[in-house]
């Protein structure tokens, strides 16, 4: 255990990982092949955001998504279905996790980063309540924007106006592109997110997401309308890169459902006495606490390259505060 008197950072959390927050070793020099293998095995083999999102995408594709031929022209039937494919998993995963972790308190404080409970009766939140605020911005705003973008992309795919691919045509590309989607999403997120931290955009737009210093499952994509308009432009890559509807579905859940886990506020989910799944992301939890650090994800270490990486240490907090002062006075 860290000695709190030696490390003031430790006193600021209920729980924090004992090691500095890790970054993808793929970008390390000299190369560390064993560490890279471990990183990807850890991300894809156990129950994680990635495997959950892939499972959701396969189920949605096999059982619920209408075939592309049906989507050649705009019609209420398939459009409603696409909206439900956004709404239902979001509600089940965020609602379920919120119920288990924060209402039922199913694992108590086990590996919970913040000491505090979610906020009620506070005027900075819509409806004066953090959870209702987050539900509104997620189901009302984010799901609407995401659905409209997806309608356009499926429609363009169906009409053959954008390059598409099938498993039979190119199985290797199919898999490679699927595995690359999280990296594309991380790259897009970093730049969009940096833009949103421009003081003007932050004040009027991104502040809605940052109302949540102590985050919960519903905070994941609790964003202002304008932020959602920007954030979901990540899907437009499918207008350029040859894709299959399954790629868009995986991208959809990666973009929408995985932030539920990364904002859950708990590092691990426990089932009985064992740690059943990875959940929270201390890297992003630090962003919500200190704002001007860790703009990206651990997937591509932009923050290290641009000097805004916070590894969870007291030194990094000092550095972040100095940077904030320099930038905002
Ligand atoms: Zn966030
Ligand atoms: Zn931010």
Image (tube, helix red, strand yellow):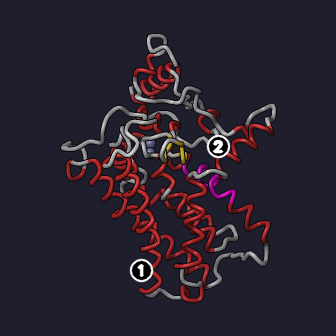
Of residues 237 and 84, the one drawn nearer to the viewer in this rendering: 84
At a point 66% along the width and 45% down the height, the residue shown is 42
At a point 32% along the width and 57% down the height, the residue shown is 135
> Hey, which quadrant is residue 179 in on the image?
bottom right
Q: Position of residue 215 (x, y in %)?
A: 38, 43
Pointer 1 with pointer 2, Cβ within 8 A: no
Is residue 140 rendered to the left or right of residue 46? Answer: left
> With respect to residue 172, does 30 lie above or below?
above
Instruction: Name the residue tied to disc 2.
Output: 300
Name which of mark 1 and mark 2 comes first in the sequence. Answer: 1
Task: Determine which of the numbered discs, if any, sits on residue 80 in the image.
Answer: 1
Classify mark 2 as within 8 Å of ligand 2 or not, answering yes or no.
Answer: no
Q: Main secondary structure of the magenta part?
A: helix
At a point 43% along the width and 46% down the height, the residue shown is 264
Magenta stretch in the rendered image = 179-189
Task: Determine the residue located farthest toward the top in the rendered image.
Answer: 5
At a point 48% along the width and 50% down the height, the residue shown is 261
> Hey, which quadrant is residue 27 in on the image?
top right
Q: Position of residue 49 (x, y in %)?
A: 55, 53
Instruction: Give me the C-alpha separation between circle 1 and circle 2.
Output: 35 Å
Classify mark 1 as within 8 Å of ligand 1 or not, answering yes or no.
Answer: no
> With respect to residue 217, does 85 lie above or below?
below
> Hey, which quadrant is residue 84 in on the image?
bottom left
Task: Determine the residue located farthest toward the front in the rendered image.
Answer: 272
Other residues around mark 1 within 10 Å, as few (<14) / some (14–19) / many (≥20): few
């Amino acid at each position: 255990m860290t000695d709190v008197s030696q490390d003031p950072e430790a006193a600021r959390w209920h729980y924090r990982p004992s090691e500095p927050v890790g970054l993808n070793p793929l970008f390390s020099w000299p190369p560390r092949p064993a560490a890279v293998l471990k990183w990807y095995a850890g991300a894809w083999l156990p129950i994680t955001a990635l495997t959950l999102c892939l499972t959701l995408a396969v189920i949605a594709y096999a059982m619920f998504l209408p075939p592309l031929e049906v989507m050649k022209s705009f019609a209420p039937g398939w459009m409603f279905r696409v909206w439900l494919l956004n709404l239902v998993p979001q509600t089940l995963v965020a609602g379920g996790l919120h119920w288990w972790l924060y209402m039922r308190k199913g694992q108590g404080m086990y590996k919970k980063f913040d000491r505090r409970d979610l906020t009620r009766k506070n005027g900075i939140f819509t409806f004066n309540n953090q959870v209702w605020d987050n539900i509104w911005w997620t189901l009302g705003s984010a799901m609407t924007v995401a659905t409209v973008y997806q309608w356009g992309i499926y429609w363009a795919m169906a009409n053959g106006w954008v390059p598409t691919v099938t498993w039979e045509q190119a199985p290797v590309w199919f898999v490679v592109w699927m595995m690359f989607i999280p990296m594309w999403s991380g790259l897009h997120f970093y730049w969009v997110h940096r833009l949103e931290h421009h003081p003007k955009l932050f004040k009027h737009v991104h502040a809605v997401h940052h109302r949540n210093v102590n985050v919960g499952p519903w905070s994941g994509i609790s964003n202002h309308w304008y932020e959602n308009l920007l954030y979901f432009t990540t899907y437009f890559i499918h207008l350029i890169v040859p894709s299959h509807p399954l790629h868009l579905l995986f991208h959809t859940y990666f973009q929408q459902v995985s932030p539920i886990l990364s904002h859950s506020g708990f590092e691990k989910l426990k089932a009985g006495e064992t740690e059943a799944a990875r959940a929270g992301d201390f890297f992003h939890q630090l962003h919500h606490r200190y704002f001007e650090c860790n703009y990206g994800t651990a997937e591509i270490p932009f923050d290290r390259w641009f000097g805004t990486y916070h590894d969870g240490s007291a030194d990094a907090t000092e550095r972040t505060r100095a940077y904030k002062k320099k930038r905002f006075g």
